[in-house]
Amino acid sequence: FIATVNNGYSYDFVTGESSSSSYILGFNTSTGVALPFCVGSVPGAITNEYSINKFNDYIQIATSEWNWSVNTNTTTSNKIFVLRIPEGDARIMDVVGETEHLGKDGESIYAVRFFEDIAYVVTYQQVDPFIIVDMSNLTDPKAVGELEVPGFSTYLHPIEIDGNPYVLSIGEEWNFTSPWSSSSSKLTLFDVSNPSAPLMAAEFLESNSYTHAMYDFQAIRWLPESKLLILPKSNGYNYYGNHGADSFQGFVVYEIGVNEVKPLYNLTHNDTNCWYEASIAGRSFVFDSNITTIFGHTVISTDLKSGEKSWEFDLDDGLNYTCSYDYSYNYRYNYNYGNEYEYDHIHEEDALDSANVNIYNYDDAISPSDDVN
């Protein structure tokens, strides 16, 4: 059995109300050929691939629904629905259970993970409610525990440490108190041994840094035996792609303990200041106690235990590093704390000379992220 999900949107021109739905199409694969045989729908839209799960003969799906009207404020509804996969000649996946609204009004689901008879959900508006949902009774799933922490998570990974269950989350925390809003990448370890009272066992914040693993889950590598987490990280790159003195692009290896999330060492993949858009998103692999990392335009092998580099291969070796710049103008501005914006037009040749180039990375997910050790 496999299923696909499509989000749909509707607007009523008479009432001025809008709504969204998720449409599920199920395929029977028992004959070796995927044949469509059942359909179902629920209100709201999914967040990502972890929003839907098959458990025995049921589909579990988490959605956020935004109800908007020209006459009222927008409201949200975050729920987990359970649909039964039909048997025989039946073709409709009926909803057999659903939760109450999860989180507060105005929040939407940012992360979800189903794990046997438990679901972990993160909703967000300004704080991050981490919610545990008891799925043991599929006709009556219900939230049993909740913990509010600053920031938000976009990826949740159930792990075990010393035989006890934890959830490791990847996300961000924003600081809105300074003249310029700033963000910090955030790793959080939740103790979920008591589902009715989850605890934050440890966290690690790093200001002005970013990991694309927040939305590119193939970039995550968790090693369950050694309790190591490998993530890509970038910091010190401004809007124009310039590298500051403390800039970094590469990977960080973190050690995850019961009460601590600790960075062990960095794997540096810094690129040249000026290059074209063609680059490889961060990926890591572990073979025979060696980490092979790919990021940007380089491949590096590192000893897992010591963090010492074994070898490095430059994918652009022998190529002309002349900048490829597709824009006639670039812009930079200074903000004078409430006075005015000052814009400087930078002509193409000047931008090339000063390396004021926007850098974008694009990557299509090609395979799930597996635990490899």
Image: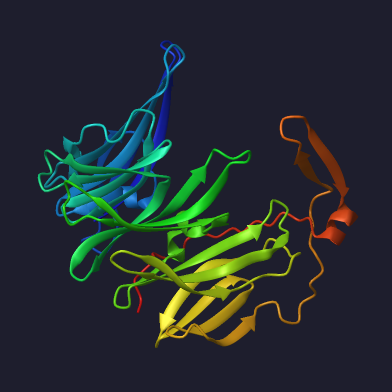
When asked about the image quadrant of residue 309, the answer is bottom right
Q: Is residue 212 left or right of residue 111?
A: right
Residue 270 in percent (x, y) is at 65, 71
Return the residue nearer the eye: 285 or 264.
Answer: 264
Residue 203 in percent (x, y) is at 38, 57
What residue appears at the point 33 percent right and 73 percent down from the top-left corner? Answer: 227
Is residue 285 visible in the rendered structure shown here? yes
Residue 66 in percent (x, y) is at 39, 28
What residue appears at the point 47 percent right and 59 percent down from the top-left corner? Answer: 213
Q: Against 72, is 173 above or below?
A: below
When asked about the image quadrant of residue 83, the answer is top left
Q: Against 160, is 357 above or below?
A: above
Return the residue nearer the eye: 92 or 23.
Answer: 23
Return the residue nearer the eye: 186 or 48.
Answer: 186
Q: How many marks?
A: 0
Q: Is residue 20 left or right of residue 210?
A: left
Q: In which quadrant of the rendered image does the C terminus lie?
A: bottom left
What residue appears at the point 59 percent right and 58 percent down from the top-left corner? Answer: 362
Q: Which color scheme is applied?
A: rainbow
Q: In which quadrant of the rendered image does the N terminus lie?
A: bottom left
Residue 225 in percent (x, y) is at 29, 77
What residue appears at the point 30 percent right and 73 percent down from the top-left corner? Answer: 224
Is residue 36 visible in the rendered structure shown here? no
